[in-house]
Amino acid sequence: LKINFKFSLPGKAFSSYPHYLIAMIRTINKPQPGDVLSVNRGLYKHYGVYVGNNTVVHFSGGSGHELSSRRACIRKTTLDDFSKDGEVQIETKCAESFSRKETVMRALNAVGSEKGKYALPWNNCEHFANWCRYGQKRSTQVEQFAASLASISALVLGTVLIGKIIEEEII
């Protein structure tokens, strides 16, 4: 197996990361029921829970409508349909988790529901998969985006303030 380490917050030393953000990703050989799976879709990663028998449960708008929040609900699909020819990865976080059996039951019991209305910032496919496995609705993608947005905002604000200070000193 190819093993890669994924760290969710850039610029911090390994030891300063909260335990739940330290994750190991391994390229898929054969997932086990209860595994949290992800597949890279370019600008984002799509997440689901492998429940066995080549089946994944995930929050999706359905075939051809994956990003549709209006159509989004918890769905069962084949592993091939979930991957859409992308590389599927098994994500393992260093955190307390439910047993594989309990993770599968949580995922299957949610099938057909909206598990709360889909909302990218607080209730997306990653939130759902992490809730099934770890009992916490978390999305490192959303957290990273928010941190990046805050950094950019601070940079823009700083640039504007420095520009104003320089302008006042020249006048």
Image (spheres, helix red, strand yellow):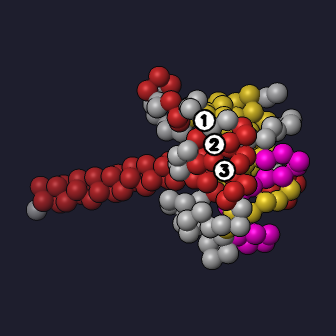
Going by the numbered disc 2, the residue's amino acid type is Arg
Residue at image position (60%, 46%) is: 130
Dot 2 alpha-carbon crowd within 10 angstroms: few under 14, some 14 to 19, many 20 or more: many
- Which residue is situated farthest in the bottom direction here? 70
Residue at image position (89%, 48%) is: 53
Marks 1 and 3, Cα distance to the nearest angstrom? 12 Å
Marks 1 and 2, Cα distance to the nearest angstrom? 6 Å
> Which portion, as a residue range, is magenta?
51-66
Q: For this rendering, which residue is in front, 74 or 3?
A: 74
Image position, residue 153 (x, y; %): 36, 56
Label 3 belongs to which residue? Answer: 106
Q: For this rendering, which residue is in front, 155 or 169?
A: 155
Label 2 belongs to which residue? Answer: 133
Q: Quadrant of the C terminus?
A: bottom left
Sequence-earlier tag: 1 or 3: 1
Dot 1 alpha-carbon crowd within 10 angstroms: few under 14, some 14 to 19, many 20 or more: some
Is the residue 71 above or below the residue 34 in the image? below
Image position, residue 19 (x, y; %): 50, 30
Mark sitting on residue 97: 1
Residue at image position (66%, 31%) is: 24
Numbered disc 1: secondary structure: loop
Going by the numbered disc 1, the residue's amino acid type is Ser
Going by the numbered disc 3, the residue's amino acid type is Arg
Please tell me whether mark 3 or mark 2 is closer to you in this view: 3
Image position, residue 10 (x, y; %): 49, 37
Q: Quadrant of the N terminus?
A: top right
